[in-house]
Amino acid sequence: MSDQLPFHVSPKVAHPPKALVPAEPVLALQLDANGRYHKLSAGGSVPTERCWLHLDYSAESAKEWLRHSPLLPDVVRESLLGESNRPKLVKVNGGLLLTLRGINHNEGQRPDQMVAIRFFITDKLIVSTRHRRVYAVEQVVRNLRQGLGPRSTADWLVDVCENLAEQAGDFIDEVMDKIVRLEDEILEQKINSRRELVEIRRQLIVLRRYLAPQRDVFSRLANEKITWLEKDDLRHLQDIADRMGRWLEDLDASIARTSLLADEINALMTEAMNRRAYIMSLFAMVFLPLSFFTGLLGVNLGGIPGNTSPWGFVGFCLLLLAIAGGILLWLKLRRWV
């Protein structure tokens, strides 16, 4: 029996799938550490540092990429697909998963219909998703084009939070200016439609609903122990949280002011209605006796005084004028008019 060499079958090595840029991204950039960027080609390899992929989660290609990309931990996929709406912060594998809300500046839409941006960020990668345009993100892109953009993913995080906060603050200032204008008009006894006041109050309540938890997110960010966030970044995030807190105080004060404005408008409308009713009652006091006499002398019966005199009608009119003058004089003396 001849010796035979043992036959070995080499096991197949499972290589991890290659990370590729999605097919139809809104943005696919690599930050160049100098405030600018390099565009990435769809379908190309994802760089290992400072990569930013911005997607519209409603697009089918983006959904497919988010569900299967090896760049993303499984726990963040559903959140990036638009499943979460309230502001939140979750630490995942040394990175951060955030959902933030911003003022809606899209044409034809109300500012208080706040837009959401969801993103997973690490020290080397940013994957952000949205459906409607987020102007805070577009401001970051404009800064990158001018060479003034973020130099790292940490800078990107701070810039987005700063832009979201500043836009919210600007909108709150605009609403407060409207409240001041309404207060001035009420002081001038101008009663406008309550529709504008109701709209302002609704906007304030919606802003309060989303900005309060977002302030908590910024505050948590400033206190989280993230290795790739430097002290300056944490200090800047804390400053953003403090400013957001002051704007929330302004929101609460503005909501209280709108309640007072509504009460004042109701009081002015009630006063105007009472004034009209009072004037009508004064007319009734004057004309009721006159109506009594005209009704009494207008009956079709004999014996009515002056019915045969050519001066009877003139005398009767003078009598009515005298009665009306007497009633008005009595009202004047009683200070009712």
Image (cartoon, rainbow, N blue to C red):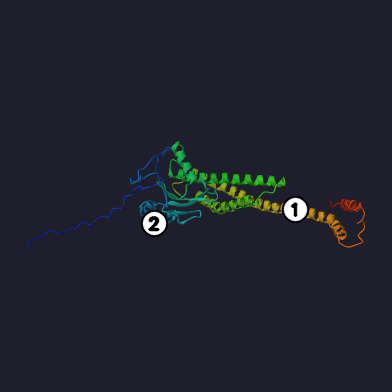
Question: Residue 69, how many percent across, how many down?
Answer: 36, 52
The residue at 46%/54% (across/down) is 90
Q: Going by the image, does 35 lie left or right of 282?
A: left
SS for callout 1: helix
Question: Residue 181, how many percent across, how many down?
Answer: 66, 44
Specify the quadrant of the image occupied by residue 3: bottom left
| Amino acid type of the residue that numbered disc 1 sits on in the rendered structure | Glu
The residue at 74%/52% (across/down) is 272
The residue at 49%/44% (across/down) is 135
Label pair 2/1, CB-CB below 8 angstroms:
no
Q: Residues within 10 Å of mark 2 (few under 14, many from 20)?
A: some
| Marker count (numbered) | 2
Of 296 and 266, which appears nearest the observer?
A: 296
Q: In this view, does 83 lie above or below 149?
A: below
Residue beneath disc 2 = 74
Image quadrant holding the N terminus, namely: bottom left
Between disc 2 and disc 1, whose residue precedes?
Answer: 2
Distance from Cα at disc 2 to Cα at disc 1: 64 Å
**Residue at the outermost left position:** 1
Q: Residues within 10 Å of mark 1 (few under 14, many from 20)?
A: few
Asked if residue 149 can be seen in this view, the reply is no
Question: Residue 304, how many percent across, how many down?
Answer: 91, 60
Q: Nearer the viewer, mark 2 or mark 1?
A: 1
Asked if residue 183 can be seen in this view, the reply is yes
Question: Residue 267, how many percent across, how many down?
Answer: 72, 53
Residue beneath disc 1 = 271
Of 8 and 87, which appears nearest the observer?
A: 87
Q: Going by the image, does 159 lie left or right of 324?
A: left
